[in-house]
Image: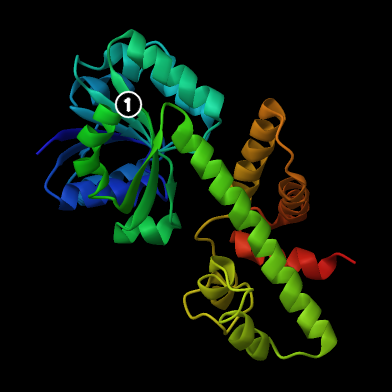
Amino acid sequence: MARIGFIGLGNMGLPMAQNLIKAGHSVVGLDVTSAQVDKFVAAGGTAAATVKEVASASDVVVTMLPAGAQVRDIYLGKGGVIASANAGTLLIDSSTVDVETARAVSAAAAGRGLAMLDAPVSGGVGGAQAGTLTFMVGGDAAAFEQAKPVLEKMGKTIVHAGGPGNGQAAKICNNMILGVSMIAVSEAFVLAEKLGLDAQKLFDISSKSSGQCWSMTSYCPVPGLVPASPANRDYEAGFTAAMMLKDLKLAQDAAKASGAATPLGADAATLYQRYVDSGEAGRDFSGIIAQVRRDK
């Protein structure tokens, strides 16, 4: 079994690391929140005090960090992962960041002869806990094959999206679809409500017709229609509105940089910005239906 270092034991990172421990790997972890580290240790992990300690003790380093700034700092900083990793160490960043950061860090790793993958995930906290995440992986094909046995302990679907940065490209494109479709579903149910059409009737029809989509059938924003939906728990977050806004902004930055037209993605970012600004950053992103109802 591999010696794995895990940096970033938050809501997603902790259950991912716990699944690696359950699979029999020796896992050393690091996080800025002591309570998360305590949970990690209780699950059988070993706590580290510094990034250098994690990197120098690992065959594989996995990171799950909030944003590009943290990824650059952890990998490129003095005493960071790239400077501290031993020859042959495989680096896997599962954070969701901008494509430019992913490619810059990958290039820096290659400069030291280290293989690196950008491997953001889809599936939320539930998927992280169940080990059913989807990994969208960018990087060298040989590194991808080396990483698969590790990723398969945390996810169900592992897809090689191409070269460095392509994992991030796939993630932001996927989440732009998700953000737009959740708004469309919300608008349809609000319209149905105003027209006097029962929500259950619309669900029964659209979930089996051409309007069917994941946002409706797996994560419906109307309470009582899909048992597992956060709508039934006052929109307790599996994937927060703030995280959706972050991904939509990343998509807009990428669209501007590449010259792509994404008007629906831009509108979705604007609507989620209003929802987050209203104090709902920590709600599940499917709570956007409340913003749709407020907008006239």
Q: Amino acid at mark 1?
A: Asp
Q: Position of residue 43 (x, y in %)?
A: 21, 51
Residue furthest to the left in view is 1
Q: Where does label 1 land, which residue?
A: 140
Name which residue lies at 65% across and 44% down: 248
Q: Secondary structure at mark 1?
A: loop
Above-or-below relation of 137 to 271 = above
Residue 66 appears in the picture as rendered: no
Above-or-below relation of 174 to 26 = below
Q: Position of residue 284 (x, y in %)?
A: 58, 61
Q: Position of residue 58 (x, y in %)?
A: 19, 27
Q: Position of residue 177 (x, y in %)?
A: 61, 53
Q: Quadrant of residue 127?
A: bottom left
Residue furthest to the front in view is 210
Residue 134 appears in the picture as rendered: yes
Q: Quadrant of residue 79?
A: top left
Name which residue lies at 28% across and 34% down: 144
Q: Is residue 276 left or right of residue 223?
A: right
Name which residue lies at 48% across and 17% down: 104
Above-or-below relation of 235 to 101 = below
Q: Is residue 272 left or right of residue 25?
A: right
Q: Which quarter of the image is occupied by the C terminus?
A: bottom right
Name which residue lies at 29% across and 30% down: 141
Q: Which quarter of the image is occupied by the N terminus?
A: top left
